[in-house]
């Protein structure tokens, strides 16, 4: 066919490197790597993750376990926390426990709860949102209403009621946070799916004889990856704050396991004599949520370059 | 509308459409019932012969795309029958319909919307193989690349994304996907109307070459009469969910019998400026009526320059007029006569 | 429009009912026995049984729920397990600190959030905009209780050490008793709740206004020669406010849940603290009452937002 040869010769002159196409996600990744703020945040987060992973190593290097009470050098004669010094770099708490080691261990709980709750909420939100948006009709009505109901729950109030009944634990914290977070993701996913469903390529797949399940997995889900990554990266700091709040109210992970939230709750009575008691867990918590937000913002920017940016070191081209 | 062509045929038509209706509910009452219906396709019958190109023209909203989707089983019909190669398609479950889809594929209008932007081209063209479990792995890749070169794409671009192709190239991807399972019938839903004029010719040539090579049958939908005239053996004109005229391409263009066909023809652009000067355009009054509440009798009567009382009351049957060729049918009580100039309303 | 509101109201009532059932059930699947909690560990089985009978806990779940629902319809939320006080009374008596905190906080965060948002949108990419984005990010990342602690430490403790005693660390003084002291005690809680929430408003206002200002009708307004001030405040801000109103509705609705932390940090003794207390006491009627009240606020504010939507933005078609 003559057309074939013409077409081939035209495309043949293009650079050979471009034959392997770059996926939208690869392009986004390339954009993200240009973003200094996002990269710096990612580096800090990796560091925090490493610290959490190697917490036992750090504890043995420091010489104190997170629950060990130092009754000799860790508590003043008046029974008060001891200021940062050579024995305890970050000082001690009211029971003479090493704040450095406890803060390091606190990262484990925060990250674990944040990651697991976010992943669980995202999975449930994507499944429910996709089903509602794809099938429409009464399935959509039922699922959309369900999400409305969950979003109408006074969640913190209900969460503390629930925790007080089943008893606080790590698993309950994760469950509660995931339960009250999936609906907001589900609602956005549903909206996205509704608009994807209108696309001609869905009709094309259907005219090929593809089943609903295949269409949802092969054609709908890949288009949800970008918005879900953005939502999840912004949900992460929210989940971490949620966990810290539960712990702060005494409804999170059970003491003596250290979490930033319960350390801060303990510090409430000692802030006037022991600033280190508040500052170290507080700063750790703030840095974690801040870097997650900065990274999430960068990810959003990389995935959707046309969206308005919250914080950027990079000049936006072709905008106003 | 009466049943169309019952003329003796040499072979059985590949596709028979009989009195197909498609009504869409609109609005919701308090109890969730539909308040009204859009009569998108309202009693259409037609036959498509093996190896021919059957053109379907009409303005936007006349129901031609809906008809295409009823034929390919994307929409369940409200009533009527679609018979492909002797097999009744209407009323089949999606599972039962699936093997039959191999005989019938569709090319879509929008080369941007019809390709999933998140999937690689190889995966898109290989979709039919995956869905029907025909070929996998290296075999699938080989066959996809064969298809790519068949439609004039560089097979080395297998791993590219749709965004890296031009509109014309994208439409070639859509064509390759439609060809994958060696269908007999391809429904082309305005395959070139989203493309530049120069690219349109390329795609049409490609479709014609493929038809010769692979013995394909096309239903070719367009709103541009020039394009349809160029490619079609026979043409049907649709208006408000009805077929108002069907004829061999040359017959329709020589003597359109239905005033609506005549008006459409007079509105289409002509390449030759001399001819264009002579041509008198028929301007229709008013807008296309709502398909929710179509006019009584002949659906065209409110806009027809020749309408009389009979047209308001009695729906005209689709039938042969005077000494027209046997396969030239029109649905009009007062068909346009040779040499007649339609009066401007 | 009317039909839409009726449908939303019916749905709202349904939500409230579902939440009441969920809360109610929660306490029956619980492994705890409120009668035992109330009587204490040393009580004889007879005492526990007596208390259980007095509280009606020995009746079937459905009967108990029926009693509760009957009371609810008559506006009676029941009586506390713990000290037999009427739940209505308990809630009303704890309302003033919560309302003070919520109202004051909402006004502050709305004004500051929107103001900073407008200023940074009109001065996009200026130094002010940069500072504002840092404010937004900090606000979004800051847990409420941490900010509260920080404020207590800096504005109460540090200032006290320096001899400045403007801000008390906590407690509540009724407005009717001493307005000046009331305000003084509320300042830190207000700032706490407002700063954390204002960030969202700044972000919303900024992005919404920037988007609106790039629309054609704004260009037309500018081309007509209207002053920039008039363009921004009369034409731009009006339609840019729609998402802000939505957010405000959501936040006011969930405020009752949101004040829990602030109340605990500052010891305001409002509804939030009552909730935490009741949870520790297993005081089922009080918890259900507060949860229902909170859910009621959410449902009502959602309803108001839906209605406001149509008023603010005529383009919105309710379906």
Image (tube, coloured by chain):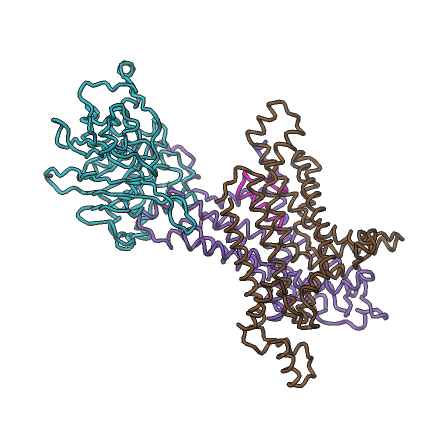
Chain colours: A purple, B cyan, C brown
Q: Quadrant of residue A263?
A: bottom right
Q: Which is nearer the eye, A285 or A58?
A: A285
Q: Is residue C37 above or below residue A228?
A: below
Q: Quadrant of residue C116?
A: top right
Residue A306 is covered by the magenta coloring = yes
Residue that sits furthest to the front in the current view: C74
Q: Quadrant of residue B299?
A: top left
Q: Residue at x 76, y 63 (%)?
A: A267
Q: Is residue B138 visible?
A: no
Residue C268 is covered by the magenta coloring = no
The picture places residue C139, in percent across and down from the top left corner, at: 68, 49
Q: Which is nearer the eye, A120 or A78?
A: A120
Q: Is residue B185 left or right of residue A59?
A: left
Q: Is residue C52 above or below residue B198?
A: below
Q: Is residue B186 left or right of residue C34?
A: left
Q: Is residue C45 above or below residue C122?
A: below
The picture places residue C177, in percent across and down from the top left corner, at: 82, 56
Q: Is residue B61 visible?
A: yes
Q: Is residue A277 left or right of residue B15?
A: right
The picture places residue C156, in percent across and down from the top left corner, at: 82, 55
The picture places residue A313, in percent across and down from the top left corner, at: 64, 40
Magenta residues (range)? A292-313
* Total numbered badges shown on the rendered structure: 0
Q: Is residue A119 left or right of residue A80?
A: left
Q: Which is nearer the eye, B33 or A236?
A: B33
Residue that sits furthest to the right in the current view: C163
């Amino acid at each position: 066919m003559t057309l074939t040869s013409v077409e081939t010769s035209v495309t043949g002159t293009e650079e050979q490197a471009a034959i392997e196409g770059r996926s939208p996600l690869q392009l986004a990744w390339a954009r993200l790597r240009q973003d200094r703020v996002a990269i710096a945040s990612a580096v800090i987060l990796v560091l925090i993750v490493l610290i959490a992973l190697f917490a036992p190593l750090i504890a043995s290097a420091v010489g104190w376990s997170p629950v060990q009470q130092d009754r000799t050098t860790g508590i003043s004669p008046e029974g008060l926390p001891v200021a940062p010094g050579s024995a305890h770099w970050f000082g001690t708490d009211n029971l003479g426990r090493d704040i450095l080691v406890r803060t390091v261990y606190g990262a484990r709980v925060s990250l674990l709860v944040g990651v697991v709750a976010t992943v669980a909420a995202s999975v449930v939100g994507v499944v429910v949102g996709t089903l509602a948006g794809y099938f429409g009709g009464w399935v959509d009505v039922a699922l959309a209403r369900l999400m409305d109901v969950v979003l109408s729950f006074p969640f913190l109030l209900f969460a503390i009621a629930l925790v007080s009944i089943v008893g606080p634990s790590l698993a309950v914290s994760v469950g509660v946070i995931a339960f009250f977070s999936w609906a907001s993701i589900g609602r956005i996913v549903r909206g996205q799916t509704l608009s994807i469903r209108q696309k001609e390529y869905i009709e094309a797949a259907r005219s090929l004889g593809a089943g609903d399940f295949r269409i949802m997995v092969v054609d709908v889900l890949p288009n949800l990856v970008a918005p879900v990554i953005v939502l999840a990266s912004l949900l992460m700091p929210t989940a971490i704050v949620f966990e810290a709040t539960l712990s702060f109210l005494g409804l999170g992970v059970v003491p003596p396991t250290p979490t930033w939230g319960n350390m801060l709750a303990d510090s409430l009575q000692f802030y006037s004599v022991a600033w280190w008691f508040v500052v170290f867990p507080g700063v750790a918590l703030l840095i974690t949520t801040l870097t997650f937000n900065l990274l999430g913002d960068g990810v959003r920017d990389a995935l959707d370059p046309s969206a308005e940016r919250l914080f950027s070191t990079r000049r936006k081209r072709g905008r106003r | 509308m009466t049943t169309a062509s019952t003329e003796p045929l040499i072979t059985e038509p590949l596709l028979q459409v009989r009195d197909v209706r498609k009504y869409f509910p609109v609005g919701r009452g308090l109890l969730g019932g539909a308040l009204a219906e859009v009569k998108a396709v309202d009693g259409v019958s037609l036959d498509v012969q093996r190896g021919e190109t059957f053109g379907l023209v009409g303005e936007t909203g006349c129901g031609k795309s809906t008809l295409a989707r009823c034929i390919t089983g994307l929409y369940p019909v409200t009533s009527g029958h679609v018979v492909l190669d002797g097999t009744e398609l209407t009323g089949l479950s999606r599972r039962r319909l699936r093997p039959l889809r191999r005989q019938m594929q569709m090319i879509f209008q929008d080369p941007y919307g019809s390709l999933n932007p998140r999937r690689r081209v190889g995966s898109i063209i290989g979709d039919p193989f995956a869905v029907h479990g025909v070929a996998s792995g290296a075999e699938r890749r080989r066959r996809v690349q064969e298809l790519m070169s068949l439609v004039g794409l560089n097979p080395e671009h297998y791993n590219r994304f749709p965004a890296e192709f031009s509109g014309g190239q994208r439409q070639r991807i859509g064509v390759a996907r439609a060809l994958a399972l060696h269908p007999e019938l391809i429904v082309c839903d305005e395959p070139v109307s989203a493309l530049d004029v120069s690219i349109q010719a390329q795609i049409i040539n490609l479709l014609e070459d493929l038809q010769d090579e692979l013995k394909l049958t096309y239903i070719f939908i367009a709103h541009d009469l020039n394009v349809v005239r160029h490619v079609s053996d026979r043409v049907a004109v649709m208006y408000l969910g009805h077929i108002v005229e069907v004829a061999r391409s040359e017959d329709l263009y020589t003597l359109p019998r239905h005033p609506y066909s005549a008006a459409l023809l007079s509105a289409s652009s002509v390449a030759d400026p001399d001819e264009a000067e002579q041509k008198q355009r028929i301007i229709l009054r008013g807008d296309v009526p709502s398909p929710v509440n179509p006019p009584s009798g002949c659906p065209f009567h409110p806009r027809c320059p020749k309408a009389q009382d009979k047209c308001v009351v009695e729906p005209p049957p689709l039938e042969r007029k005077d000494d027209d060729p046997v396969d030239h049918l029109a649905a009009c009580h007062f068909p346009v006569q040779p040499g007649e100039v339609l009066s401007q309303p | 429009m009317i039909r839409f509101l009726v449908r939303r109201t019916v749905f709202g009532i349904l939500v409230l009912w579902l939440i009441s059932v969920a809360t109610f059930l929660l306490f029956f699947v619980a492994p705890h026995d409120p009668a035992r909690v109330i009587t204490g560990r040393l009580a004889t089985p007879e005492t526990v049984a007596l208390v259980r009978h007095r509280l009606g806990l020995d009746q079937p779940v459905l009967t108990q729920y029926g009693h509760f629902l009957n009371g609810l319809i008559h506006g009676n939320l029941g009586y506390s397990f713990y000290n037999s006080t009427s739940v209505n009374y308990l809630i009303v008596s704890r309302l003033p600190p919560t309302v003070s905190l919520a109202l004051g906080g909402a006004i502050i965060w709305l004004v500051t959030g929107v103001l900073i948002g407008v200023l940074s949108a009109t001065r996009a990419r200026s130094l002010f905009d940069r500072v504002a984005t840092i404010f937004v990010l900090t606000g979004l990342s800051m847990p409420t209780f941490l900010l509260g602690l920080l404020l207590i430490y800096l504005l109460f403790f540090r200032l006290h050490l320096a001899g400045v005693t403007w801000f008390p660390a906590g407690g509540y003084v009724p407005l009717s008793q001493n307005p000046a002291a009331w305000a003084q005690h509320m300042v830190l809680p207000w700032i706490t709740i407002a700063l954390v929430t204002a960030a969202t408003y700044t972000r919303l206002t900024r992005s919404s206004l920037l988007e609106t200002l790039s629309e054609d009708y704004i260009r037309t307004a500018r081309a007509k020669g209207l002053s920039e001030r008039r363009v921004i405040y009369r034409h731009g801000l009006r339609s840019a406010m729609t998402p802000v109103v939505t957010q405000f509705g959501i936040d006011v609705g969930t405020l009752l849940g949101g004040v829990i932390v602030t109340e605990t940090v500052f010891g305001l003794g409002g509804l939030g603290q009552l909730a935490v207390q009741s949870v520790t006491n297993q005081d089922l009627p009080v918890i259900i009452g507060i949860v229902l009240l909170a859910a009621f606020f959410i449902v009502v504010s959602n309803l108001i937002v839906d209605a406001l939507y149509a008023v603010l933005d005529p383009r919105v078609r309710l379906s």
